[in-house]
Image (cartoon, grey):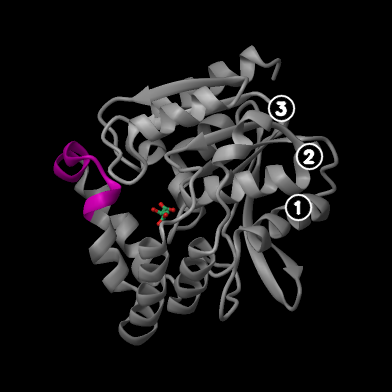
Amino acid sequence: MKTFPINGTNLSFVDRGAGAALLFVHGFPLDHSMWNGQIEPLSARYRVIAPDLRGFGQSGVSDGIVTMEHFADDLAALLDFLTIRDPVVLCGLSMGGYIALEFWRKYAKRLRALILCDTRAAADTPQAAANRFVVAENVLREGSNIVADAMIPKLFAPITLQQQPDLVEKLKQVIDRTDPRGIAAAARGMAQRADFTADLPRIGCPALVIVGQGDAISPVAEMQAISKAVPNAEFKIIPQAGHMAPLEQPQAVNEAIERFLQQNGM
Ligand code: MLT
């Protein structure tokens, strides 16, 4: 991985291939490796950039709170560091999707297309937001493994839990290794995120909305509603996948992404 300095810390990222730039933003509380099924195949034709967000993977950690806007600013800074001036395709999963919407709000001119995977446009309910703060305190006190244990059953489709135990175990290890301060800061940031539901009709770039058929966190109906609200959006359901569709069924997800990019002249 490469690194770049930002505000007294370092952020790590993968940068592979050449061509139109695809920026892949991971979910919570993961790292760039959740895109391993995309990085190699798609970098044969495109420039694939996959950062570890602040507080995750090999990147530096910020205490307190990291908002979705702060993460979006880090992405813009990464593009500046790489001197990428042309608009990019931004693909975000779940928390990565919240960040992608924030990036659209602030940096729409830097976006060529959006790919929203297994994510939501709505903000947290007050109860969900309050629970994030409880999670933040618990993880700081007890360690990242409590988040891994709570989340793993919800992240994958039952068939993945049964048939791909190595994949599940690797993801669990990623969460276990994550600094609790990074998890707490992002959980607090997600609790405060904006509601984008009313903004979706103003998204002007092409969009692809992808959801695992068995996604228990961002269900199919909610993702379909996003795709209907965005004027120029396509919708793709991935069979035999849950919330981690790109990791569970990389081939089906890559086919959808490549078709979408080709239809849009990339
Ligand atoms: C994620 O996968 O990023 C999380 O499920 C997002 C969330 O907790 O809302």
* Marks 3/2: CA–CA distance: 12 Å
Who is closer to the viewer here, 111 or 126? 126
Mark 1 sits on what residue? 76
> Magenta stretch: residue 18 in it?
no
The magenta-colored residue range is 153-163
Mark 3 sits on what residue? 204
Q: Residue at x 45, y 76 (%)?
A: 179
Q: Amino acid at mark 2?
A: Arg
* Marks 1/3: CA–CA distance: 19 Å
Vertical side of 216 occupied by 51: above or below: below
Residue 82 appears at what percent x and percent y? 80, 50
Locate residue 116 relative to residue 82 in the image: left or right: left
Q: Residue at x 75, y 69 (%)?
A: 5
State yes or no: discs 3 and 2 in contact (Cβ < 8 Å). no
Locate residue 164 relative to residue 77 in the image: left or right: left
> Magenta stretch: residue 154 in it?
yes
Magenta part, dominant SS: helix
The yes-or-no answer for disc 2 within 8 Å of ligand 1 is no
Mark 2 sits on what residue? 110
Q: Quadrant of residue 126?
A: bottom left
Secondary element under disc 1, as helix, strand or loop, is helix
Residue 154 appears at what percent x and percent y? 25, 51
* Marks 1/2: CA–CA distance: 9 Å
Q: Amino acid at mark 3?
A: Gly
In this view, the residue farthest toward the top is 263
In this view, the residue farthest toward the bottom is 141
Residue 161 appears at what percent x and percent y? 18, 45
In this view, the residue farthest toward the left is 162
First-in-chain label (3 vs 2): 2
